[in-house]
Structure formats: C-alpha cells, structure tokens
Image (tube, rainbow, N blue to C red):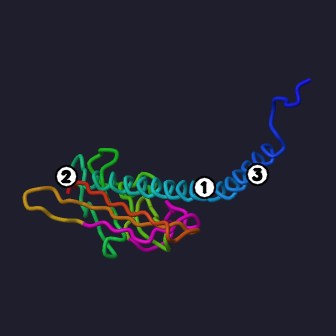
C-alpha cells in the first residue's frame, strides 16, 4: 500500500477556498455597482429617445407648415414666447382652406412648453388657454428648454430649428440636448 496517495492536501484545499472566497467577495461588491451603472445608462438612453421623438414630431409639423391646396388665409407659422410656443397651419385634407372647426379636423396644431412639459393642442389659435395635452410626463423627465427659431435666407426657404433640453426627474444631472433643423418650403 503506497504511503502517498494522489489528490490535494489539506493545505492546498484551504488555500483554494481562501482564494475562491476572496473572488466571490470582490464579485459581490462589484455586481451592484455594475447593475447601477447599467440602470443609469438605460435611463439616459430612454430619455434621449423620448427627446428625439418629440423633436422629430415638431419638426415634421414645421416642414408641413404653410401647405395649402388653394387659397388659405392667415399666418402659416406663429412663433410666440421667444419660440417656446408655436402654432403651425397646413391644409391636411387638401380642401384649399385651413379649417378651424370642428377642432378634431382643424388644420392648426400648437406646441408649447408649460411647467416642464411639452404640450400640444389641435385647433390652437393662441398659446394661452386650457385643453392642451401633455406630450411628455413631467413625473419622469422635465423639459428644461424648448425653442423653435426661424432663420431667413435670401432667396431660399427659411430654416427652422427645434431645440430641446431635458433632464430626468429622478436624476437632474442626467440631461439630454437635441437640435434639429428643417426647411420651411411652404412658408
């Protein structure tokens, strides 16, 4: 019978267990930090997507502003409150006029910044009043800045730029800024 048998000695097993325990302890401290970073990045990405979706919606309306399949009367684009509110008009049903009634079929749409939320109203004639619907949830994120600027270029259609800045309500340091320009060919 051999005196030495194959296998691990008690000392080798204890050293392996000590190293394994240290690795598990390090991993258990690292994992929550990693999960927190992933959560913050996911929230930031969701905020960025929300902001860009809203910017594209407003920009699409600006591109359509002024379209008329006939002789429409009135101002196709009203910018008020230093660009924080706008009303666009375009002949959605191509009947040759900018309809004002019924409100559900009105050819004007308003967008405004109000109490950290972007709001919209179909059939808007002014930036004041009630009945505006929130496009964003101020409980999730705040719209800190929303402006539309119009830059005239001689001989060309005006350039309309939508700028929006938002931050998470739960983490005001997490901010997103978006700026998008379109040409107002019908203006």
Q: How dense is the environment of label 2, judged by Cα within 10 Å: few (below 14), some, or many (20 and up)? A: some
* Mark drawn on residue 185: 2
- Which mark is first along the chain, 3 or 1? 3
Cβ atoms at labels 2 and 3 below 8 Å apart = no
Residue behind mark 3 = 18
Which structural element holds mark 1? helix
Mark nearer the viewer, 1 or 3: 3
**Label 2 to label 3, Cα distance in Å?**
72 Å
Left or right: 106 with respect to 10?
left
- Which mark is first along the chain, 3 or 2? 3
Q: Name the residue located 19 percent from the left edge and 65 percent from the top edge.
A: 151
Q: Position of residue 25 (x, y in %)?
A: 72, 56
Q: How dense is the environment of label 1, judged by Cα within 10 Å: few (below 14), some, or many (20 and up)? A: few
Which structural element holds mark 3? helix
Give whichever of 60, 72 is nearer the camera. 60
Question: Is residue 137 rendered magenta in the image?
Answer: yes
Which structural element holds mark 2? loop
- Up-down relation of residue 16 to residue 26 (above or below): above
**Which range of residues does the magenta coloring cover?**
127-149
Tell me the quarter of the picture where residue 181 sits.
Answer: bottom left
**Label 1 to label 3, Cα distance in Å?**
24 Å
Q: Position of residue 29 (x, y in %)?
A: 68, 59
Q: Quarter of the image containing the N terminus?
A: top right
Q: Which residue in the rendered view is the most extreme toward the left?
A: 155
Residue behind mark 1 = 34
Mark nearer the viewer, 2 or 1: 1
Give whichever of 54, 98 is nearer the camera. 54
- Which mark is first along the chain, 1 or 2? 1
Question: Is residue 98 rendered magenta in the image?
Answer: no
Left or right: 50 with respect to 72?
right
Tell me the quarter of the picture where residue 165 sits.
Answer: bottom left
């Amino acid at each position: 019978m051999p005196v030495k048998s194959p296998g691990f000695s008690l000392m080798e097993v204890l050293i392996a267990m000590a190293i394994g325990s240290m690795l598990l302890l390090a991993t258990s401290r690292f994992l929550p930090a990693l999960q927190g970073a992933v959560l913050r990045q996911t929230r930031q990405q969701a905020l960025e997507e929300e902001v860009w979706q809203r910017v594209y919606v407003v920009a699409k309306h600006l591109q359509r502003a002024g379209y008329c399949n006939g002789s429409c009367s009135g101002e196709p684009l009203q910018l008020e409150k230093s660009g924080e509110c706008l009303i666009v008009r375009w002949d959605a049903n191509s009947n040759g006029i900018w309809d004002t009634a019924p409100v559900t079929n009105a050819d004007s749409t308003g967008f405004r910044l109000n109490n950290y939320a972007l709001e919209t109203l179909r059939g808007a004639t002014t930036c004041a009043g009630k009945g505006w619907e929130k496009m964003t949830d101020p409980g999730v994120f705040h719209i800190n800045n929303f402006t539309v600027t119009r830059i005239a270029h001689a001989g060309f259609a005006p350039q309309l730029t939508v700028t929006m800045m938002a931050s998470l309500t739960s983490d005001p340091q997490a901010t997103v800024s978006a700026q998008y320009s379109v040409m107002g060919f019908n203006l």
